[in-house]
Amino acid sequence: MPKLLYSLICSDIIVDGDSGSASYIRVFEHGSVPKLPAQVPPFFVASLWELDPKDQTPFTVHLALVLPNGKKQELGKNTVQPKGTLMHKLNFRLPGLKIENEGRHDIAIAVEQDGKTKVATKLPLHIFLKPPADKAN
């Protein structure tokens, strides 16, 4: 089964076409909102997977939002067909999220291969309410 080497949440990704090197712009793990519900703007979930070059079995990466109450919302999935490489970068572009509650939300990343599914990691996304601004009298 592929091994997750790293993952992160960021606002943008720049990938160099020649080298394949990636620059991750505005990495974040929390946000402050003036009121709820709130909309998280579009963002990326970036990941790098280590593969066994001898194993050509396809695998699927699943993303889910785990709410503070434990409920899950599916965010997307992508099936990868290995091509004998050692590593595979996989980036998801999400259109944003509607957030109803303050607290810790998790972006769960799971990998499925040969009928087996394993949660590879959970990335925290903390949502805080901004305190009301003091009004000068």
Image (cartoon, rainbow, N blue to C red):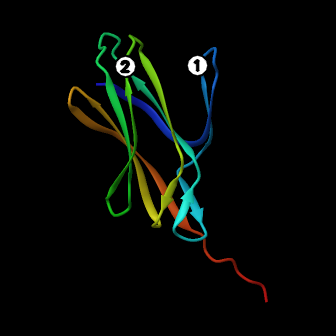
Residue at image position (46%, 66%) is: 100
Q: Nearer the viewer, residue 96 or 118?
A: 96
Residue 34, picture quadrant: bottom right
CA neighbours of label 1 inside 10 A, class few (<14), some (14 to 19), many (20+): few
Tell me residue 55's x, y (percent): 29, 14
Above or below — where is 98 with respect to 85? below
Number of labels in the image equals 2
Q: Which residue is mark 2?
A: 81
Q: Position of residue 83 (x, y in %)?
A: 39, 12
Q: Is residue 9 left or right of residue 106?
A: right
Q: Is residue 33 left or right of residue 79?
A: right
Packing grade of label 2 (10 A; few <14, some 14-19, many >=20) is few
Q: Residue at x 33, y 30 (%)?
A: 60
Mark closest to the chain's N terminus, 2 or 1: 1
Does 89 sit left or right of 22 as displayed? left
- The quadrant in which residue 71 appears is bottom left
Mark 1 = which residue?
Answer: 20
Q: Residue at x 22, y 26 (%)?
A: 114
